[in-house]
């Protein structure tokens, strides 16, 4: 029962993390910068993995998509690949996790389901690591440009999408670790069951041997007075 509850908690954590990671990919504010006037914010610059935009004080936004994938900076291409990999791995991890849970009726025996659940945990851990690496790589580029005194172009700060991605990656990793522990719990329960069955088989074999030994004691002769 405890193992089933742990698997349900792990599944909820990993699904929540996967949803957050998936929502991070199209989110606008990966990095943001503002130009403040004396009274109001005159312009807000923001960008993500697909475009860069500017919003003026009236709320009108002008966006420009990145013209060519081959002309992009290397870190943006790496972040795109890692985030797409994280989303794909999370999708397959959710399928394996659903099959490997003990509360479902598919997947075979308990040992087979435990192995499938452990595989799902490993996939979710890889998904979380991909998302964590992507967000960290993007944040490292932002902070290095921000604190570089020789960098004279527009400086940005960390956007909300990075924090959402870190949170989703953490949930995926934590849930994946819990899934991996399910195979260890299943192995311990299987060992206890094997020891009990072994003791039962030994007792039954002794009983069969005792019953199979013929009775070699001499026949008893009773005198006719014994029935009186």
Image: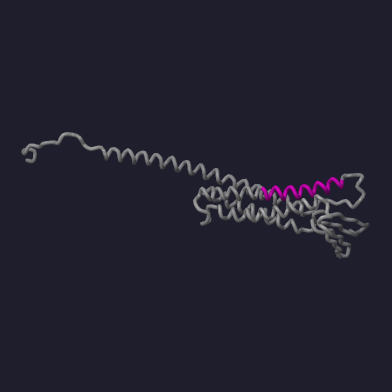
In the rendered image, the residue lying farthest to the front is 70
Using the image as rendered, state which of residue 106 and residue 58 is in the foreground.
106
Q: Nearer the viewer, residue 130 or 36?
A: 130
* Quadrant in which residue 149 is drawn: top right
| Residue at x 72%, y 55% (from the top left corner) | 84
| Residue 194 pos. (x, y %) | 44, 42
- Relative vertical location of residue 29 with respect to residue 202 in this rendering, above or below: below
In the image, residue 151 sits, relative to residue 48, either above or below, namely above
Q: Is residue 214 left or right of residue 76?
A: left
Q: What residue do we see at 65% from left, 56% from top?
A: 91
Question: Residue 47, how many percent across, how many down?
Answer: 83, 56
Give the residue drawn at x 70%, y 53%: 85
Question: Does 156 appear in magenta?
Answer: no
Q: In the displayed structure, does residue 27 sit left or right of residue 181?
A: right
Residue at 86% over, 47% down: 145
Q: Which residues are magenta?
A: 126-146
Say whether residue 133 is left or right of residue 41. Answer: left
Position of residue 216 in the picture relative to residue 15 (left or right): left
Position of residue 70 measured from the top left corner of the image (x, y, whole percent): 82, 55
Residue 94 x %, y %:
62, 55
Q: Main secondary structure of the magenta part?
A: helix
């Amino acid at each position: 029962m405890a193992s089933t509850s742990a698997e349900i908690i792990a599944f909820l954590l990993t699904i929540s993390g996967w949803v957050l990671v998936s929502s991070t990919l199209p989110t606008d504010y990966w990095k943001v910068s503002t130009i403040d006037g004396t009274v109001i914010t005159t312009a807000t610059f923001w960008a993500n993995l697909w475009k860069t935009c500017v919003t003026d004080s009236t709320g009108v936004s002008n966006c420009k998509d990145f013209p060519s994938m081959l002309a992009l900076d290397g870190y943006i291409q790496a972040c795109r690949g890692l985030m797409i990999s994280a989303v794909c791995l999370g999708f397959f991890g959710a399928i394996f996790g659903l099959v490997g849970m003990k509360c479902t009726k598919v997947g075979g025996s308990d040992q087979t389901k435990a192995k499938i659940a452990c595989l799902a945990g490993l996939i979710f851990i890889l998904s979380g690591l991909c998302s964590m690496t992507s967000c960290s790589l993007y944040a490292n580029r932002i902070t290095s440009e921000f604190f570089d005194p020789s960098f004279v172009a527009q400086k940005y700060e960390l956007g909300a999408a990075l924090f959402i991605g870190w949170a989703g990656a953490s949930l995926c990793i934590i849930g994946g670790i819990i899934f991996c522990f399910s195979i260890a719990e299943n192995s311990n329960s299987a060992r206890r069951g094997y020891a009990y069955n072994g003791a039962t088989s030994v007792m039954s074999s002794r009983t069969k041997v005792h019953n199979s030994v013929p009775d070699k004691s001499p026949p008893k002769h009773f005198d006719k007075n014994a029935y009186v």
